[in-house]
Image: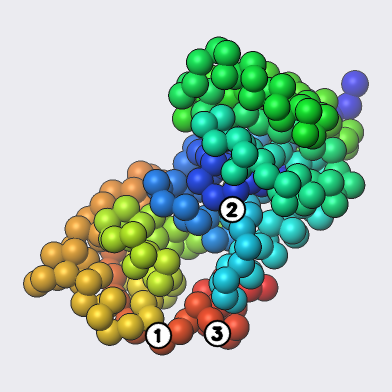
Amino acid sequence: MGTKCGYVAIIGRPNVGKSTLMNSLIGEKLSIVTPKPQTTRARVLGILTEDDAQMVFLDTPGFLRPRGLLQEAMVREVREGLSEADVVLAITDATDLERTFDEELRELLKSSDRPAVVVLNKMDLVGQKEIFEGLKWLYERFPTEVVPISALKGHNLDELKKVLKGFLPEGPFLYPPEVLADQPERFFVAELIREELFLNLGQELPYATAVKVEEFRERDPSEGKTYIRATIYVEKPSQRGIVIGEGGAMLRKIGRWARKKIEAFLGRPVYLELWVKVRPKWSRKEAALRELGYLR
């Protein structure tokens, strides 16, 4: 019997646990996760190889009605993920099914000719009766394989992988078995810095920020330390002041926690230098979005 391999697009409304699920399936933190919705802005690719099957997951931004050029680019990422997928994995929230599996999302699934698997996520937050009723509710509205899981706790992920494997086409692996991702290290470094912005700043400010890694090199080979210089872009001078904080306290805090995460990800010591610059209306300018990697 030959090998099976295919792309699995993970889609869903904001904050339903898409990134948490991909990280749990891969066994490595590839997508940043915060309590704030719309943390994911670009597709993140994660590769899971087990025995005779390889699943290439595409973690897409939360599906929403776009307001502005940046969100339009995010929705385009979702639709492109759908078009590239061999199977679609739709994530719903067991505590909020009507919002997270509404008619608009169902129509998006129906518009694709790809097979779909629907996941009832956050099963750990509801009782057995609610799980049963949730599975019934989902199946009645979209008859397909429906699997209850907890992405955060890792519950029932083996069953989900078994179901997904059944939809994969036969074919050779696209990546060597030991490879977990195909994005460059710079991409993940920028994402880890952006994660700290979301975790440490207020409700709205993180959405006006972007991160670009300007320099990434071995500064002192004898120490084995990697030098990283990154710029945090904001849209207004007042936002720059908040990111820097009084006496630079906030920027130091963001840099300290980001450096620890980057060192854990890279597996080596890092010297991280952060700068904050004002770039007015960057989220509404096509050239800026292209430079920052949100448009291709």
Q: Position of residue 33 (x, y in %)?
A: 44, 46
Q: Position of residue 11 (x, y in %)?
A: 66, 46
Measuring 21% from the left and 77% from the top, which residue is drawn there?
Answer: 241
Q: Which residue is mark 3?
A: 285
Q: Nearer the viewer, residue 240 or 258?
A: 240
Seen as rendered, the residue at the extreme top is 128
Q: Are marks 3 and 1 in contact (CB under 8 Å)?
A: no
Q: Which residue is mark 2?
A: 62
Q: Can residue 193 be spotted in the picture?
A: no
Q: Is residue 145 left or right of residue 151?
A: right
Camera-near label (2 vs 3) is 2
- Image quarter where the C terminus lies is bottom right
Measuring 49% from the left and 21% from the top, which residue is drawn there?
Answer: 126
Q: Residues within 10 Å of mark 2 (few under 14, many from 20)?
A: many
Q: Which residue is mark 1?
A: 279
Q: Position of residue 156 (x, y in %)?
A: 60, 19
Q: Residues within 10 Å of mark 3 (few under 14, many from 20)?
A: few
- Which of disc 1 and disc 2 is earlier in sequence? 2
Q: CA distance from mark 2 to mark 3?
A: 21 Å
Q: Amino acid at mark 3?
A: Lys
Q: Are marks 2 and 3 in contact (CB under 8 Å)?
A: no
Q: Secondary structure beneath disc 1?
A: loop
Above or below residue 282? Residue 111 is above
Q: Secondary structure beneath disc 2?
A: loop
Q: Nearer the viewer, residue 40 or 168?
A: 40
Q: Amino acid at mark 2?
A: Gly
- Which of disc 1 and disc 3 is earlier in sequence? 1
Above or below residue 271? Residue 53 is above
